[in-house]
Amino acid sequence: MIEVFFSIYCFGDAMASYNTNEFRGGLKIMLDGDPCVIIENEFVKPGKGQAFNRVKIRNLKTGRVVEKTFKSGESVEAADVVERELQYLYSDGSEWHFMDPESFEQYAADAKAMGDAAKWLKDQDLCTVTLWNGSPLIVEPPNFTVLEITDTDPGLKGDTSGGGGKPATLETGAVVRVPLFVQTGERIKVDTRSGEYVSRVKD
Amino acid sequence: MSPASRTEPAAWRPSASLDALRARAAALGRIRAFFARAGVLEVETPALSRHATTDPSLTPFATRYRGPGHARGLTLYLHTSPEFPMKRLLAAGSGPVYQICRVFRNAERGPRHSPEFSLLEWYRPGFRLEDLMDEVAALVQTLAGRPLAVEHHRYGALFREHLGLDPHRADSAALAAAARAQGLEIRLEARDAWLDLLMSHCIEPRLPADRLCFVRDYPASQAALARIRAGDPPVAERFELFLGGMELANGFHELADPREQRRRFEEENRRRRQALPLDTHLLAALDAGLPDCSGVALGLDRLLMWLLGEDRIERVQAFAFEDA
C-alpha cells in the first residue's frame, strides 16, 4: 500500500524522482539545480548505523566530476535528460540548428552546448545530442568524420625527415596535423574525439 | 558498478573462483580448529525466530509459517545475527560458544554488503574486552598465516585527531559544520547519523589498511548491546575491528542487565517506523543471569575478501545475490 502510494507520488507527478535504491551508473539526477549523471554509486553502511550512498557524479553543464553522499532511502529529483541522434542543418552564427530525422522536430544549440563539436560539423552529419528539458545541453559530433583540406603548405612535399607532419585547415575551419604527403584538395578521415588525422580518403 | 553489467559469461556460473571457494573451505577448517584448541563449543541456533532485533539500523526479512500449530500463519523473522539465542545458551550454562552461520539483512547491497552473508560470532565468559580483542587478532593472524601489526584507538581520540572535535560532547550543529568543512553536503537529523557519516567518510579511510585497527569506547548512544561504562563522558564498552579499509568485526562487553536491555529494546522500537516483537526469551534469560562475558561478530566474507585481495563480496561467495 505504501509502495503504491509512493509510486504515484513520485512518477504520477510532474516532478519525477529517484530513490537512492534506484541509483546506478548513467542515471540522470538534479543536483543544486544542475543536471548530472551518476558515474559510480557505492553503498556505505556501518554495521550498527546509518546507511549512505556515496556517489560520483558528473555535472552535465560544467563537465565537472564531484563526490556526493546521500542518506540511503532519500529521494532525489530526476533530471529530464535524454540523448537523441539529431541531424545537423546549419548555423546562423550564434546558434547551431539540428533536426530529429524521425519527427522532423528542430532544436537550436548555443555555443556552450556545441563546445568543440562546431569545428567538425558539416551539413547532414548525425550527432548525439543530450537534451535537458528539451534543449540541447551537449552536442557530440560523429566519432569519425571525412573533411576536405582547404589549405596546407605544399612546400614540404617530399620532405620526410621531420616526421611530425604539418598543419592543415579543413573545410569546417578545423586545423589538424597531417602527414607531409597530404595536399590541399584531398579528403581525410579525422577522429573527432582526439582531433587526430586517421587516413586519406579516396573516392 | 551495476551487477547486471558484469562481464561474466553466464548468470548460472559461480561469482567466486574455485580457488576462492577452496580458500573459503580451508578458512572454515582453520577457524574450527582454532576454537577446538581454545575449548570453545560450536553451536547452531535457529535462523527463524518469532522475535526480531529492534536495532533501527537493521531491517530483518520477515516470512510466514503456516502448518501444524499455526493454521492461520505465524510471522517469523530471519536472524540478522545469532546473538539472542547464543546468549540464552550462555545463561543456560553453555560456557564459551561460537557459531558460523548465514545471516540476513534486508536493504543492504554494495561491494561489501550482501543481504545474505556469513557471520562468525563467539562469546567468552570471563573475558574483558581487551582479552577478546587479543583473541580476534590471534584468529585473524592464524588465518593470514603471518603476524600482523595491531593498533588500538579510542573513538574519541580518532575524532579529535582527524576532525578536531569531541564526538561524545559535540552537538549536531558542530558535527554538521565539521562535515561541511570536509566537503560533505547532506541533510541528516539524528546526531548519531552525523557521527556515522564522519566516521565512515573521514576517519575509516585514514586508518592503515595493512594493520589490525581496533577502535573502542564508542559513544554511549551507540552502545547497541554493549555495557555503558560510567564516567565523564560515559562510553560504550564496544569495539570495532577495521582491516583493509573494511569494518570487519564488532564486539561488546555484553549487557547483562535485563531492565536496561528492555529499556533499550523499547527505546529502539519507538525509533522504528514499525515496532518489532522484542525477544522476551532473551529478557528472561538475562533475568536468570547472563555470565559476565564479551562477545564479537566477525564478517567472514569480508575477512575472506581481505585474505584473497578481492574488492567485491560476491568474489568470495559461491553465487552473487543477483544470481541466487
Image: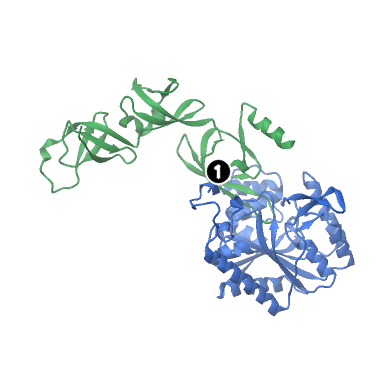
Which residue corresponds to mark 1? A24
**Quarter of the image where one finds residue B215:** bottom right
Res. B148 in view: no
Vertical placement of B221 versus A127: above or below? below
Residue extending farthest to the front is: B68
Tell me the subunit letter for badge 1. A
Residue B184 falls left or right of residue A2:
left
The local crowd at label 1, few if under 14, some if 14 to 19, many if 20 or more residues have their Cα within 10 Å, is some
**Which residue is nearer to you in this view: B155 or A33?**
A33
Residue type pointed to by label 1: Arg
Vertical placement of B230 versus A4: above or below? below
Looking at the image, which residue is at 34% across and 22% down?
A91
Chain colored blue: B
Chain A color in figure: green
Looking at the image, which residue is at 64% across and 55% down?
B165
Locate residue A186, reporting x and y percent: 18, 33
Locate residue B232, reporting x and y percent: 76, 61
